[in-house]
Amino acid sequence: MSDVGVVVEHIVDRQADVDGRRIETFEAFYQAEYPGMVRLAHALIGRAEGAEDVVQDAFSRLHGRIEGLENPGGYLRTTVVNLCRDRQRHGRRERDRNRQMPDAPALSLGASELVDVLLSLPYRQRAVLVLRYWGDWSEAEIARSLGCRPGTVKALASRGLARLRKEVAP
Amino acid sequence: MTQTDIEIRLREALIDLTQTTPLENPERPRADGNPVGVGRGGGIGSTGPSRGAGRPAAAGGRSRPTPMEVKVLTAVGCVVLLAAALGFGAFHLHRSPSRIPSAHTRTTVPTTDVTVPDVVGQMLPPALSVLERAGLQGQFLSVESSQPNGTVVHQTPAPGTEVSPSATIVLNVAGGGRSSEGTVTVPNVVGESLPEAEAAVRASGLDPMTPAPTGGTTSPGTVTGQAPGAGRTVVPGSTVILQATAS
């Protein structure tokens, strides 16, 4: 993780020599979007580990192109969503380990069970649920990020919800 | 739009999950030497069960800066905006720049003035983060706009204005549709009696939901847990789950 961070920092520093304005833009963008993106990645891959890697990776892909993009935020989010899909295969064990963390005083209400079921869903179903219920994304936005049609988003969501309903104790 | 139980639970579960997101290096030191970020010693890469230690509660005094999480006093924001509007109506000829009264600033040791960053056009959560990092307080008020919900359409004072550190910046945020009322801050009701807690939640424009206490009795007790947690900003009408002990 820190390696990626260093790389990004290095790129940014080099850019600063060339064009002080541009670094300002990228820096501000990075600062603003970073925490939310890490949380998004966390929700999408279901574990904290790797979430920052994904986001750093996404930022490094975006760097240098940010000004040519009409919607850098959207591009970033889509990149994160896609990188998380690549990531999710790795290490289910970490997730199990993470789950052993004691719950915060804020109640859980079987939350971890629900998250477990969520993580067992196919990635696109899970992503739709996360983006819709956690991210409050519009259907169109979700469809763009997943590269499918809005109708598909609806179908994925209802399938995912049905599965949750069935498998999570009431 | 009514939500099914599973949708509510899913939302809460995801919020709970991402409340534990460790943010190791969300803020890197900036070249201009602004005291943004917090010096983290070692620990980079330790994403294990170090939640809570992920980010010292320095700078903004917030330990968990969710994008949506900012202490916002909407009421105060309304008053300020109303006052500004009245002032504008009465003295529009003067066209004086509407500064936010310094009464809203924190009583910290005054240092050099801060230049208000431009957050117009950004979505609210990142905009608030930007202000917070500049040491400024953000308050917001939803307004009618053709822009997408949650977009900052106007800010007062204007970008580039020099203000005292920890001044309050009022953001006009595009509303309409589901989030037309802006957002509200979830009150802290843990420790209160259930009726009190429910009243407080309702008073905030939120909808309390109380699962049956685990003891098998329905008599109301004391609230021991809540989700979303206190201080989170949510859409009005959102459900706040209250867990109460059997009394």
Image (cartoon, coloured by chain):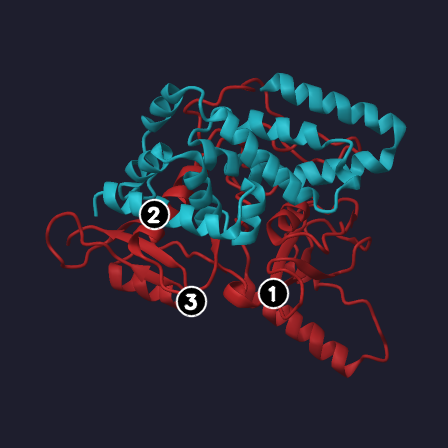
Q: Residues within 10 Å of mark 3 (few under 14, many from 20)?
A: some
Q: Are marks 1 and 2 in contact (CB under 8 Å)?
A: no
The x and y percentages for residue A69 are 75, 42
Q: Are marks 3 and 1 in contact (CB under 8 Å)?
A: no
Q: Are marks 3 and 2 in contact (CB under 8 Å)?
A: no
Q: Residue furthest bottom?
A: B90
Q: Amino acid at mark 3?
A: Gly
Q: Earlier in the sequence, mark 3 or mark 1?
A: 1
Query: What is the display colour for chain A?
Result: cyan
Residue under label 1: B141
Q: Which mark is residue A161?
A: 2
Residues flagged by tags 1 and 2 on a common chain: no
In the image, A129 versus B201, the foreground residue is A129
Residue under label 3: B205
Chain on which label 2 sits: A
Q: Which mark is residue B246?
A: none
Residues flagged by tags 3 and 2 on a common chain: no
The x and y percentages for residue B76 are 58, 66
Q: Nearer the viewer, mark 3 or mark 2?
A: 2
Please determine whether, in this image, residue A169 is positioned above or below residue A90: below
- Distance from label 3 to label 2 (Cα)? 27 Å
Q: Amino acid at mark 2?
A: Leu
Horizontal arrangement in the rendering, residue B127 relative to residue B186 (left or right):
right
Residue visible at 40% across and 63% down in the picture? B206
